[in-house]
Amino acid sequence: MNNSPGLNSENPKKAERLPGEEGVWVFILGDMVVFALFFAVFAYYRSLDIQLYKQSQSTLNQNYAAINTLLLLTSSWFVVLALHEVRKNKTIMARLFFASGLLCGVGFALVKILEYREKIQHGITMMTNDFYMYYYIFTGIHFLHVIIGLSVLMFLLLKTKQDSLTIKDIQTFESGAAYWHMVDLLWIVFFPLLYLVK
């Protein structure tokens, strides 16, 4: 199982195809367009009351955000490594990397929960002001994407227990990895937009 040649090595042209299922890429593109509209709306309303947004932003915990950025970047790196091993049909190493990526993703979720808890304990909710309304809505929707992504990673982790992988299986792994990278990319935009932009 772990010493068989990579599936793509049998036909080099396969490496040139779009990784994953086309439908997943349509979903990802649509999701990115929706979030781009979110970012534009946030930027517009921020321009109407910059002082309020700056004051509210200063109450955010940048340490939590930095830790979460590191966790998601590391998780994506592990998923890249896992996919590389899957393409070589080395499922034991792929399982280890998927488990590591999953663990980092769980770490992200726990840190985000701590951040929400800290805000709520200080009486800061989405009703506090416009900045926090957007903060809770945007990070909440992203958090939902993270939970879905963690379920996807768990599915892929379990799928590595198969005795052998087909081209269709590889596409499933690629699709799941693409979704997780989208979750990472969205956070990379959220981090400076909500926590750093002055």
Image (cartoon, grey):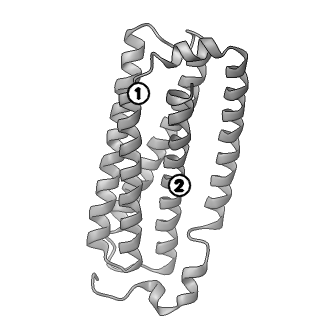
**Residue at the extreme bottom of the image, as rendered:** 10
Image quarter for residue 113?
top left
Q: Nearer the viewer, residue 170 or 97?
A: 97
Query: As drawn, is 60 to the left or to the right of 192?
Result: left
Residue 62 placement (x, y as % from top left)? 41, 27
Quarter of the picture containing the C terminus is: top right
Residue 25 placement (x, y as % from top left)? 64, 60
Quarter of the picture containing the N terminus is: bottom left
Crowding at mark 2 (Cα within 10 Å: few <14, some 14-19, many 20+): many
Image quarter for residue 67?
top left
Q: Amino acid at mark 2?
A: Tyr
What is the CA distance from the residue labelled 1 to the residue labelled 2?
Answer: 26 Å
Whether residue 110 is situated above or below residue 52 in the rendered picture: below
Q: Nearer the viewer, residue 59 or 173?
A: 59
Query: As drawn, is 172 to the left or to the right of 3?
Result: right
Circle 2 is placed at which residue position?
Answer: 179
Whether residue 158 is situated above or below residue 166 in the rendered picture: above
Answer yes or no: do the residues labelled 1 and 2 have beta carbons within 8 Å? no
Q: Amino acid at mark 1?
A: Gln
Image quarter for residue 88?
bottom left
Query: As drawn, is 188 to the left or to the right of 70?
Result: right
**Residue at the extreme front of the image, as rendered:** 198
Q: Nearer the viewer, residue 138 or 170?
A: 138
Which of the two labelled residues, at mark 1 and mark 2, occupies the earlier sequence position?
1
Whether residue 43 is situated above or below residue 103 in the rendered picture: above
Q: Which residue is depicted at the point 55% across and 43% down?
A: 186
Crowding at mark 1 (Cα within 10 Å: few <14, some 14-19, many 20+): some
Residue 4 placement (x, y as % from top left)? 32, 88
Circle 1 is placed at which residue position?
Answer: 62
* Kind of element beneath mark 1: helix
Residue 150 placement (x, y as % from top left)? 41, 48
